[in-house]
Image (tube, rainbow, N blue to C red):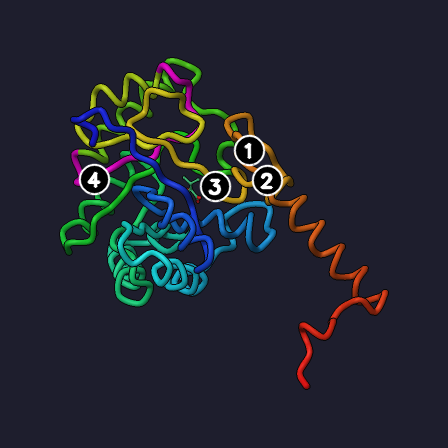
């Protein structure tokens, strides 16, 4: 698709119903993101997410999307400790979760880890730039690569993960011109989030595009629907009808 100039579409999913809707709409790839920690569990960041939680959500997503490529995120501390842990936990997401590939955060320092997972035939998506698991080092969720030195490092990160065997790279929260330069200088697809239009594809969090989570609204998010108001209206009607004795009617009762 990169060679053909066809944009790659990616959305996150964490459960069966959304996974079915997303897959049936014709998405190219579903990411079971560790953003599940924020948009599903209500944490302030992704750091508390566990392997067992990722496996649980990955299973549900795979059930809804059996013909779509499903990539599962490796949560914080599931791959940073050593290569054995990284291989073992990547294997769990494939074997127990049913994903076809895993994603992990980090550039050059993670090259050895990516190489080690790819060596046991588990495809890896890399993730560079704004890496949410490094929130404390970055001092918040801040755009990365605005200064020359940092931009050079992110470009080197992208080249290192390609060289290590990653089959795609998520570029998050970097200036558009840096994303364009990276996209032109690697042969694997770049999937942008807050990285401008010149990436080979785009990924967003499903709750963000549907207006399901308004805790944070980063500049790069576009709301394509507002299902919060539909859901609230439906719940409000239910409460009103039950209180008024209007529900259930004969139609919803047994004789
Ligand atoms: O966890 C996630 O959802 C992600 C994407 C936003 C890239 O890593």
| Location of residue 233 in the rendering, given as x and y in whole percent from the top left corner | 71, 49
Q: Which mark is residue 211?
A: 2
Distance in Å between CA atoms under marks 3 and 4: 21 Å
Residue matched to label 1: 223
Residue nearer the viewer, 169 or 12: 12
- Say if the magenta span includes residue 250: no
Distance in Å between CA atoms under marks 2 and 4: 31 Å
Instruction: Locate ligand 1 by image quadrant.
Output: top left
Distance in Å between CA atoms under marks 2 and 3: 10 Å
Q: Give the quarter of the image for residue 11.
A: top left
Q: Is residue 242 above or below residue 168?
A: below
At mark 1, the secondary structure is: loop
Residue nearer the viewer, 133 or 26: 26
Q: Residues within 10 Å of mark 3 (few under 14, many from 20)?
A: many
Residue matched to label 3: 205
At mark 2, the secondary structure is: loop
Residues shaded magenta? 163-177
The reply, left or right, for residue 38 in relation to residue 110 is right
Q: How crowded is mark 1: few (under 14 residues within 10 Å), some or many (20 or more)?
A: some
Residue matched to label 4: 167
Q: Residue furthest right?
A: 244
Beta carbon at label 3 within 8 Å of ligand 1? yes
Beta carbon at label 4 within 8 Å of ligand 1? no
Disc 1 or disc 3, which is closer to the eye? 1
| Location of residue 45 in the rendering, given as x and y in whole percent from the top left corner | 55, 45
Q: How many numbered marks are there?
A: 4
Of the residues under marks 2 and 4, which one precedes in the sequence?
4
- Kindly identify the residue that appears in the image at 27 percent across and 22 percent down: 182
């Amino acid at each position: 698709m990169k060679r053909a100039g066809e944009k790659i579409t990616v959305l996150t999913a964490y459960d069966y119903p959304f996974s079915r809707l997303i897959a049936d709409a014709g998405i190219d790839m579903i990411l079971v993101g560790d953003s599940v920690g924020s948009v599903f569990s209500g944490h302030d960041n992704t750091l508390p997410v566990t392997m067992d939680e990722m496996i649980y959500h990955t299973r549900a997503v795979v059930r809804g999307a059996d013909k779509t490529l499903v990539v599962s995120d490796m949560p914080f501390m599931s791959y940073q400790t050593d290569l054995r842990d990284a291989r073992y936990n990547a294997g769990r997401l494939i074997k127990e979760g049913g994903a076809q590939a895993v994603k992990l955060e980090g550039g050059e320092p993670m090259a050895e880890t990516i190489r080690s997972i790819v060596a046991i035939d588990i495809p890896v998506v890399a993730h560079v730039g704004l890496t949410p698991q490094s929130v404390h080092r970055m001092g918040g969720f801040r755009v990365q690569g605005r200064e020359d030195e940092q931009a050079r490092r992110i470009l080197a990160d992208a080249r290192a993960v390609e060289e290590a065997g990653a089959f795609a790279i998520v570029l998050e929260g970097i200036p558009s011109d840096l994303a364009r330069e990276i996209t032109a200088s690697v042969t694997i697809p770049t999937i942008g989030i807050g990285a401008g239009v010149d990436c080979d594809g785009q990924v967003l969090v499903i709750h963000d595009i549907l207006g399901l989570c308004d805790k944070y609204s980063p500049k790069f998010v576009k709301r394509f629907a507002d299902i919060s108001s539909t859901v609230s209206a439906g719940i409000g009607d239910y409460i009103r009808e039950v209180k008024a004795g209007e529900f259930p009617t004969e139609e919803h009762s047994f004789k």
